[in-house]
Amino acid sequence: MLDETKRASLQTFSGNLPPDSARPSDSPRSKKNIVSRVAYLIGVDAKHFGLDNDGSMNPQFYRSVYDEMNADKEARIVRSLCRLRTKIQRNFKAISTEMNSDVKNLDSLPDLVPPEILCSLEADGISIVRPRKRPEDYIIDIHNYLLPHVPNCQKFIPSWVKWIYIRNLFFIPRGNTTDGNREAARLYYECRDLFPYQSYINWQPDDRDGNILRDDAKFLPILYDRNRDKFYDMSKVTEAGDAAIVDPREFFAEAQRVLVAVDCENADPCKVIGIIKELSRLNLVKKIVKIILVDDEHTSSQWRALRRNENLPLEYYMTDRVKDDKSAVDVALTIKFYREILQSKAEGLPVDSAIIISSDCDFWPLIELTPEVRFMVMLEYDNCSQSYYQRLQNNDVPFLYIDEYFVAGNLEMKTEIVLQEVIREIEEGYLSKINIFSVINHALTKLELKMNDSEAAAFFSRYIAPMNITFAKNGSAVLQNKPTLKE
């Protein structure tokens, strides 16, 4: 949620625009990244992506988005379920008649329910057809199937878009009840032409909206408005605001020696790891002479995942707090950064380019007072003030939003970070407290028995070493391969 200061500054900025430019839906250069992804998931016909046609039609959505998402199992499942729900609602009376009078099921009504939808679901592990089911029962089943699969598609939506607003489009209110689905079916039947491409979503249609999926600049403001919120930064959805936003490859192409400064207090570790992984994938890391991470004792332990990467030229510095409510990260980072610039000059290998990974505008003086270095700023959409964004643009300082790189692989990064932390907790925490020889000695003492060294070694090799520890579904540790003892 935007804080009040940011909200006020954005309202002032928007209010000073000329009347025509304040109408985002009129932008001729609006992007279609978000609407293409939403259209795919809600089941908009493939022909609108340029598929299944003779090539003469101008597609409304990006074919590249369709191909990307269609390669993902979770996205395919959500799309197929939404298509099936729309088909059932659109042909509800005819399907009911066929199922009641001729004792047919969904898989025997190819004119009403395209077989490829059911085949796609079957191929992805969902057998939805059941005997003695009514159409309304299938709608409830679809709702229940969507519940676990829709959240897995969050990775396709940039983090600067409020995911909860997108998520709610897929779920009928009280969708696990017959009454809730009847109300949704009634609304769809009465206003079908007002739904985007006649695809059902959880939406109150308004004929003044027109095609809400026309482009991102139209869709997001309407979506936010329906959720009693306001979408502010139109630069994210129109080409016009991209003049200063660069591809990192362009910046590195002109650089020889790059210094990277990371403000750990004002940067998300997952997103920073994401952009550094991307730089590594693009083979750009080789131009980085050092990555300075300045951290605060109150920030996230997730930074350990980056610090463990031995292939990166990392320098990690933890600041102490003199006062509990005052951080020294920005001052420490500025000093360490400038010392590195001076030292590189003294060694005859000057740093010519620098990247600051932080959404904090406190680093602007560093950029302004170091003209001999080319700067690029990597920031997060939600944490960057409009005034800072304008300052960077007005002074031709290139920047990019690292949110995009996090979205592309957030599940992979989350998995890596969590797995590393779990392994660390087990090895350094719980397992470090267990020594099997201490356990054996404790058992011998408790039983008032003794073993000599050779007996203890044989006992360990034969009975203890073959055992291993696994984890039950409830998380409890369980011994496996326990030796069979005589009764």
Image: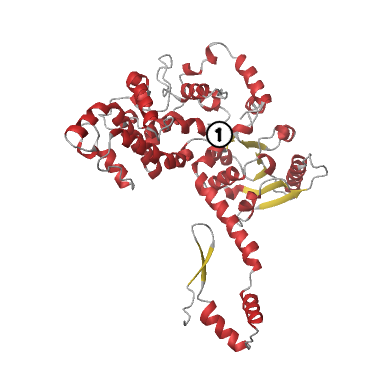
Q: Residue at x 75, y 45 (%)?
A: 336
Image side of residue 97 versus residue 263, left or right: left
Q: Is residue 318 visible?
A: yes
Q: Which residue is mark 1?
A: 246
Residue 45 at what x, y percent from top left? Answer: 31, 30
Q: Residue at x 63, y 49 (%)?
A: 302
Label 1: state its secondary structure. Answer: loop
Q: 10 Å neighbourhood of mark 1: few (<14), some, or many (≥20)?
A: some
Residue 217 at what x, y percent from top left? Answer: 49, 23
Image side of residue 79 versus residue 438, left or right: left
Q: Residue at x 63, y 89 (%)?
A: 452
Residue 411 at what x, y percent from top left? Answer: 50, 46
Q: 63 or 457, which lies in front?
A: 457
In this view, 274 is above or below 422: above
Image side of residue 70 versus residue 241, left or right: left
In this view, 461 is above or below 85: below
Q: 401 or 465, which lies in front?
A: 465
